[in-house]
Each structure stands twice: as C-alpha cells, then as structure tokens.
Image: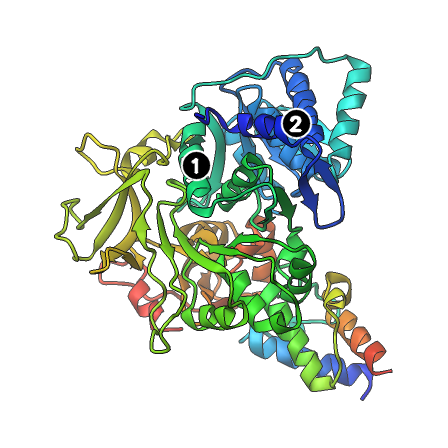
C-alpha cells in the first residue's frame, strides 16, 4: 500500500462520514480539515480510530495533533511513517 | 464570616496560605497564593493609572493561564467588571463583544492584537490595550506591567470593595438574533453559589480542582472561586488537552485531581476513549457535571470505571448559574434508560413552573421552569427589552424564565424534558440556532438558510439546510470554512444539505417541521 492508496482510503472515509453529498473533487490532499471546522475534535477521534483499525497501526495520544492530521496528505504521511 | 465580594476570596486565602500553590497550568507553570495576589494588585494599580473606575468594564482575550486568573482579580480590585471572551473565536465576534459593552481597557495576547485592532478600527472604537507576549505562570503579565512601569510608574492604589450587588463579570452567550448577548452578573450572584458549594462539597486547602471550562463559560465560577476561597489548588486544563480524552485521562490521574467539574461530553469521551481502567484515580473524590444532558449509557459506563467518587448533576443557565442539583445515588438501576434528573432547587433559589401563559401549573405538571433568588442575573447588557422578556411579566418577584421545560417528580426532583425555543446545548456550549442562520445569511450566495439539531444518544448533530440565489449547489467544505471564519468552531454545523428552495408553510414561512423529517 503506497501513500496514494492511503490518501484515497482516508478521503473516502472523510467524505462518507463528514461530508455527505460533497463533490469528491472539492476535498483535496491539502484541504485544511481541523482548522476550518471540517473535522471537529470528536471527528478527529473517529478518524484516528479508523486509521488504527484500517491500517493496523497505533497512534499515540501526543501524535493525534493538528500537525499530523490537518490535511489528507499529513495523515497519509503519518500512516506511512507508522507502517515503515 | 460574611463573604463580601469575589476578589476578597483571593486576598483572604493569600493571607492564610501565602506559599501554597494557587494555580497550576497544564503546560507546567504555577503560581502561589502570595504571588498571585501581588500580581493582581500590580494590575489593579496599572488599571487605575489608566483611569479604570468602579463600574467600568475591562476585557480579557487570552488563553486560560495564571496570567488570566491574576487579570480577572486585578480587574475586580478596581471595582470594574471583567469580560472574558473565547480567544479562539473569530476576531469579529470578540471585537463586537468588547465594543458592545465598551470595555475601557483590554488585556490581550500579542498574537491576537492585530486581528482585534483591525476590527476595532472598522468599528471606530479605540480601547486602551495591555498587550502581553504570551501566557504562563503570570510571567508575561508581570513583564508587560514592568514595561509599562518603565514608561510611567503606576502608583499604589487601594482595592475597591464595591457593593456586592455591583457587576463582577459579563459572560456573552449565543444570541438568537445573530449577535451574542452579555449576561450581567454581580458579586452577590456568584457568591450565593460559591458559598453553597462550600457547604455541600466541603473543599479544603488539600483539594485539587480541575479547571476544564473556559473562563467565558459560567462553569469557571465554581472552579476559580470555590477553589481559591478554600486555599485549594486550581489545575488549569489547556484547551487542546481538554478535548483529547486519551491524553486527558493519563494527565488527570498524574495530577491527582480531587474535584472534577465539566460538561458531560468530555466525561462521555473519557469513558469511551480514555482507557480509564489503566490509571489510578484514587484521589478523585467528586465528579460534577453541568451544561447539557448526560446520555445515561455513557454515564453508567463512566460510573463503572470510576466507582468511588461522588457524582453531582448540576443544572442552571448562565443567567442563574447553578440553580438545581442532583446528588446521584451510589447505585443506578440497570433498568434506568432515562437521563438523570436535574434534581432539587438550591437553597438560594426559588422555583416556579408555569404554562405558556405564565400561570403556575399544578405540582407534577409539565411547564417552563422559572427561577428567582440570589443568583439570578441583573439583566443583559444594554438590552432592556430582551431583559424584560427574560422575566415573567406582571409579577413583583423577578422570575427568570429558563426556557427549559421540566416536570417535578414525586421525589421532589425536577426532570428536564426539553426547550421551548431554538436554543441547544452541544458539548456544554449553548447555541442559538438562529445565530448560525444569521451567519449563513451573510454568505453572498445564500438565499435561504435553516439550521436544525437532531439530538440522539451520541450527541447533538447540527444540520444546515440552504438554498442559493442562482440555484447552484454550494460546497460543504466551502460552507464549513465560511462558518469557521464567522462563528466559533463549536457552532459550525456538522452537516449541510443544499436544496433548490426550502420547504414552506401555508403562510410562506420556512417549514421547520418538514425539515425535521429530512434528517
């Protein structure tokens, strides 16, 4: 699984759960998620749970922060680093 | 001993417990009682030098910190009222608040200064600023005061002891017309509640209180003043930590907190995501919650993980602070699926349950809860009509209409049934759906907007229905961004639905009942 596959899986999850009806093209790898209200704090917890289950990784509490999770590309990078 | 006014609580404790820790910050900073009292005196002197008079307002725009605590005491020591805002909210909203109640001086973190100045200049408003270069253990505030002293020293002033009925603080809450409104509360309003907490919770100087709620939120009144009154330690929970159950769970155990007070939502999250069975919470003796309904399944889960503390469900809008309380029994029957009652009325309040016409209903009947007594607000800042409407008409007693529909149970406890208007409680925040609609209407493409809440067991998702002038569909991402620039993040709707036009009633009003079925 490469970074692009991870991005796609995360994107599908966010579109289905938090942006139903949104044009998939409007959500890019660099759209800010946490700082714009697209994901609130509880949504972030659910994204983390999704990442842990989907990719078999463990995200430590101190890693679930805006620097690692604000965009799909940040998230994919975090998952890749964890899987490495 | 009569309590007098709020800021005397700090000075009395400083005299008894000078070297004990008054405030600890989650980032590691701390300040003792003596230093906290002295820092607030220095701010008092500076504010007097800037001509702050009893009856004035002074604003506060900074993160929760020892600096902020020293500031609110310094402000009250001049006889002025403090006006705290959410430092993460859009500058336009905060500038509106400071302008609305005409703060004479604003104490602000440097990183927030420019955003506010821009807004002030658009309003043609020029409050004096005390700018601090961050927050932490009172040091940035102390530095700012030193710097001002080098320009023009502030001479020692005396602490003003106003009448207890004078304003102590103004808390702005969501307003249905689209602008926040300022709830005016006096020293005696707060102290009625604080003194009752002393009786019921029996705090002492060895207690360690959480401070989870932000200072613009009325839960902070218990945290700050009950803890400092008794020489206890107030342990501040920084905002990000406060929303992160996994980190918070271990932090809370490490800090050996004895009294926790927050909205139920973070307690629900701690129970679900905090792995509470892996930590030692033996210090925790009291868990208090208020601000919204605690879903019973998460309350039971929490209670199964934290078995030893005593739990209290506290209830009351900002306008009355806590006015009813429920001492949760040690055992909750397995069969209980209803939320906890809001309990009995606190001794400083009197209840009245009325029907839609304002007539008292027979005991045990459903109706709107009205509250009179020592903790009831003075009014809304500069909104005499709104203030008049907040109380029952044509009565000698000032009965504040809570807007909450309740029923008195045979046990004498009140049970909350719902709202009579469009206000909701989400994660402890009070939200007027009308304020979100007003923000959406500011979007140039939006023709119609209606916002509804769809509460369920897991929370209170908010959904906005919109239509546009040219019939095009608006991107949810764009709408969320737009809302986040115009509203605090907790008010940004969770979901959006774009319709060609909104359904209408026969009188051509937006049909909310129809929209309710369009979840």
Q: Which residue is mark 1?
A: B195
Quadrant of the snapshot with the C terminus of chain B: bottom left
Quadrant of the snapshot with the N terminus of chain B: top left
Whether A45 is drawn above or below B342: the answer is: below
Q: In the image, is A68 to the left or to the right of A20? A: right
Counting residues from the start of the chain, the first of labels 2 and 1 encountered is: 2
Mark drawn on residue B37: 2
Mark drawn on residue A81: none
Secondary structure found at label 1: helix
Secondary structure found at label 2: helix
Tell me where residue B65 appears, x and y as whole percent. Answer: 68, 41
Whether B464 is drawn above or below B214: the answer is: below
Whether B13 is drawn above or below B508: the answer is: above
Q: Label 1 is found on which chain of the structure?
A: B
Can you tell which quarter of the image residue B508 is in? Answer: bottom left
* Residue at x-position 35% and y-position 45%: B323
Per the model, the C-alpha gap separating discs 2 and 1 is 21 Å
């Amino acid at each position: 699984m490469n970074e692009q596959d991870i991005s796609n899986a995360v994107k599908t999850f966010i579109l289905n759960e938090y942006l139903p009806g949104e044009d998939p093209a409007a959500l890019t790898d660099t759209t800010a998620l946490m700082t714009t209200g697209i994901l609130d704090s509880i949504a972030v917890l659910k994204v983390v749970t999704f990442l842990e289950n989907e990719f078999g990784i463990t995200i430590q509490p101190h890693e679930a922060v805006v620097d690692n999770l604000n965009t799909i590309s940040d998230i994919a990078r975090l998952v890749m680093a964890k899987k490495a | 001993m009569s309590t007098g006014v709020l800021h005397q609580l700090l000075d009395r404790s400083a005299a008894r417990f000078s070297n004990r820790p008054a405030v600890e910050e989650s980032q590691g900073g701390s300040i003792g009682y003596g230093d906290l009292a002295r820092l607030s005196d220095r701010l008092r002197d500076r504010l007097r030098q800037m001509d702050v008079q009893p009856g004035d307002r002074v604003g506060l725009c900074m993160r929760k910190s020892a600096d902020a605590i020293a500031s609110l005491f310094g402000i009250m020591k001049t006889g002025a009222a403090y006006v705290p805002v959410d430092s993460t909210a859009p500058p336009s909203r905060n500038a509106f608040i400071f302008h609305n109640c005409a703060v004479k001086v604003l104490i602000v973190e440097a990183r927030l200064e420019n955003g506010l100045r821009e807004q002030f200049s658009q309003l043609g408003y020029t409050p004096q600023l005390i700018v601090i270069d961050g927050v932490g253990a009172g040091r940035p505030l102390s530095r700012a005061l030193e710097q001002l002293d080098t320009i023009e020293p502030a001479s020692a002033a005396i602490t003003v002891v106003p009448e207890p009925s004078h304003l102590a603080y103004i808390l702005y809450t969501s307003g249905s017309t689209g602008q926040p409104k300022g709830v005016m509360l006096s020293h005696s309003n707060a102290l009625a509640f604080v003194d009752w907490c002393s009786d019921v919770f029996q705090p002492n100087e060895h207690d360690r209180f959480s401070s989870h709620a932000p200072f613009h939120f009325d839960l902070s009144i218990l945290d700050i003043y009950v803890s400092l009154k008794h020489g206890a330690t107030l342990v501040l929970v920084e905002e990000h930590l406060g929303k992160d159950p996994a980190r918070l769970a271990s932090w809370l155990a490490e800090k050996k907190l004895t009294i926790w007070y927050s909205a139920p939502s973070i307690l629900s999250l701690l129970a679900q995501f905090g792995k509470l069975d892996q930590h030692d919470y033996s210090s925790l003796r009291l868990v208090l919650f208020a601000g919204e309904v605690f879903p019973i399944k998460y309350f039971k889960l929490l209670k199964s993980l934290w078995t030893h503390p005593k739990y209290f469900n506290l209830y009351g809008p900002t306008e009355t602070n806590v006015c009813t309380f429920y001492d949760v029994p040690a055992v909750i029957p397995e069969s209980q699926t209803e939320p906890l009652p809001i309990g009995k009325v606190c001794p400083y309040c009197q209840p009245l349950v009325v029907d839609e016409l304002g007539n008292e209903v027979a005991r045990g009947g459903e109706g709107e809860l009205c509250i009179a007594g020592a903790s009831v607000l003075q009014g809304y800042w500069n909104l005499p009509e709104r203030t008049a409407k907040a109380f029952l008409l044509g009565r000698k007693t000032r009965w504040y209409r809570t807007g909450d529909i309740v029923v008195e149970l045979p046990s004498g406890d009140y049970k909350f049934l719902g709202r009579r208007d469009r206000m909701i409680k989400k994660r402890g925040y009070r939200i007027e759906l009308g304020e979100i609609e007003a923000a959406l209407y500011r979007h140039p493409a939006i023709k119609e907007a209606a916002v509804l809440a769809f509460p369920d067991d897991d929370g209170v998702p908010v959904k906005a229905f919109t239509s546009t002038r040219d019939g095009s569909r608006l991107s949810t991402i764009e709408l969320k961004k737009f809302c986040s620039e115009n509203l605090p993040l907790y008010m940004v709707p969770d979901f959006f639905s774009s319709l060609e036009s909104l359904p209408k009633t026969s009188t051509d009003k937006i049909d909310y009942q129809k929209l309710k079925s369009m979840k």
